[in-house]
Amino acid sequence: MLFVYEDKGDIQKQIERGTIAMFAESVIKSPSWQDSDAAQVAEAFLLNQFDMDFTGSEYQSLEPYNSYSAHNSMQWQQFLAQKAQGAFIEGMETLFDDRSFYKSQTLGWNEFSDIIYDETGRAWSEGFEPPVPDPVVEDTTYSYRVMIDWEEGSTTAEIRFEADSIAIDQLVSVDAEVIGLSETQMRELTFTGASDGVVLNVPSMLENIKLTIKGRNDIELNPEKPFLFWMYQLRNDDEEERRAEAANGISSYSDNPDIELLLNDVLRSEESDMVIAEVLKSMSEITDGASGTDERFMQFSGSNYAMNIRIAAVEALSNYEGNERVISRLQNIIRQESSDSLQTTALQSLSKIVDTERLAGITSSFIAGNQIPDHVPFLLYTLAENGAGEQAVVLADKTLEWNTPYDVTGEIIRFLIETDESSVNWQNRLPELMSNPHPGVRLAAAEAILKLSAGSRSDFIDTILPNEFDERVRRKLREM
């Protein structure tokens, strides 16, 4: 019998591979599942002979259930095509040509390689040395705070460079664009080490100083500027990245009485999604959930805005604890939106503004409608972290009644293993989990058998082991 799967690649290729695998295993039988390489290499040899390539990324992503999975034959395909010695290939060709393998034999790897040696006079690995990978050298990156100090009307500005962690030991050149009221000047600065600084002569009517490192991308400068510099950059810079940087930097001046007026003015005129998102983040820090400021973020969370703007607005709604309009808005986003990142952000915000009892009720309603199954584990963990572990366990069991995706089921099982110590609960839960058709679910659930009492554990394993076909699960059960 040959099984094919809708979600595991091209159906025709699955049938082709399965047919060849069945033939290979019919003529070279493995003495045990631990010693299946002979059949696997025979399968790979035939796949290569028929120019059937199963080494692409689509097939490498298949989940390896056991030693007979596609992963092993794909590895042998790559070995035969790229690394195996000619004598080994010639030996296999001879053995198939003279029909040595057209009768059923039980061969482990040692017996199989002996046959190759007897045919060719050379060991299969003779002359083959596994490639030694080059050591991975991670590129060093450097991060510096750059503090620009200037008093309004002064003709000098001080610029200090402070390393955040690793300091560079080379002299770094920096282009400084000094923007005055009537002219712009270009200067070249240098710095090195953990701490360095320079004093610049500047116009008394100074608008901004912009710094750029040219010719290298391993140094990050994080400027801290006077409020007037950020304000000028946010309103006037041609580059949206610079304007977004200014929108972020200006939030450190939350006590300035003009800042909220400035940001509102920018929101009315700005066209860049990147900049608008940064402005909303800064406004969120500045307003910090103040009464009457939620409407702005509700507006920008609407579907007529770009996704990064909506996410920034939804993040800001996490400041409005107990606000029923905000709670309702977040629940609607969670239920109606298809974007996973937006749903995740809305759930995170919602969990911060409702109490544990309310969150449990909301989670229950999501589970009852089989809504957002991918996000249920997050809600369960959040409830448990807030002292509602027992409620979360009950909700987790309800979720398992639905046909949830395998990865979600696995997460819920892991949550239950971490949270529920009741042997009675596991005695009721495990029979169904261990009869699940997905071997990954059974493997995850097998960990929980240790939650049973010693006597119950032994009886339960004796009951399910004869019907278990997945070698990983069988091995796990035998180890208990």
Image: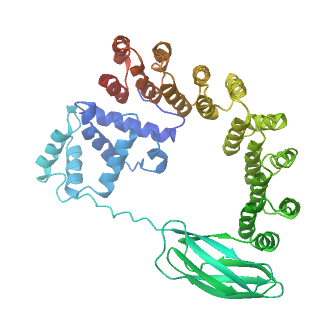
Q: Is residue 187 left or right of residue 326?
A: left
Report the label total: 0
Q: Examine the rendered structure and indicate whether residue 174 appears above or below residue 429.
A: below
Q: Percent from the top left, x then y, of residue 455?
A: 34, 11
Q: Percent from the top left, x then y, of residue 269?
A: 87, 64
Frontmost residue, 197 versus 73: 197
Q: Percent from the top left, x then y, of residue 89?
A: 24, 53
Q: Percent from the top left, x then y, of residue 108?
A: 20, 36
Frontmost residue, 465 versus 421: 421
Q: Is residue 46 left or right of residue 437?
A: left
Q: Examine the rendered structure and indicate whether residue 149 appears above or below residue 420.
A: below
Q: In terms of image quadrants, where is residue 150?
A: bottom right
Frontmost residue, 390 versus 238: 390
Q: In terms of image quadrants, where is residue 447?
A: top left
Task: Identify the coloring.
Answer: rainbow
Frontmost residue, 75 versus 249: 249
Q: Is residue 312 left or right of residue 466?
A: right
Judge whether residue 49 can be spotted in this image.
Answer: no
Give the residue at x 84% y 36%.
325
Give the residue at x 70% y 25%.
357
Give the residue at x 15% y 43%.
115
Give the residue at x 34% y 16%.
466
Judge whether residue 469 can be spotted in this image.
Answer: yes
Q: Quadrant of the N terminus?
A: top left
Q: Examine the rendered structure and indicate whether residue 20 appears above or below residue 146.
A: above
Q: In terms of image quadrants, where is residue 178?
A: bottom right
Q: Quadrant of the C terminus?
A: top left
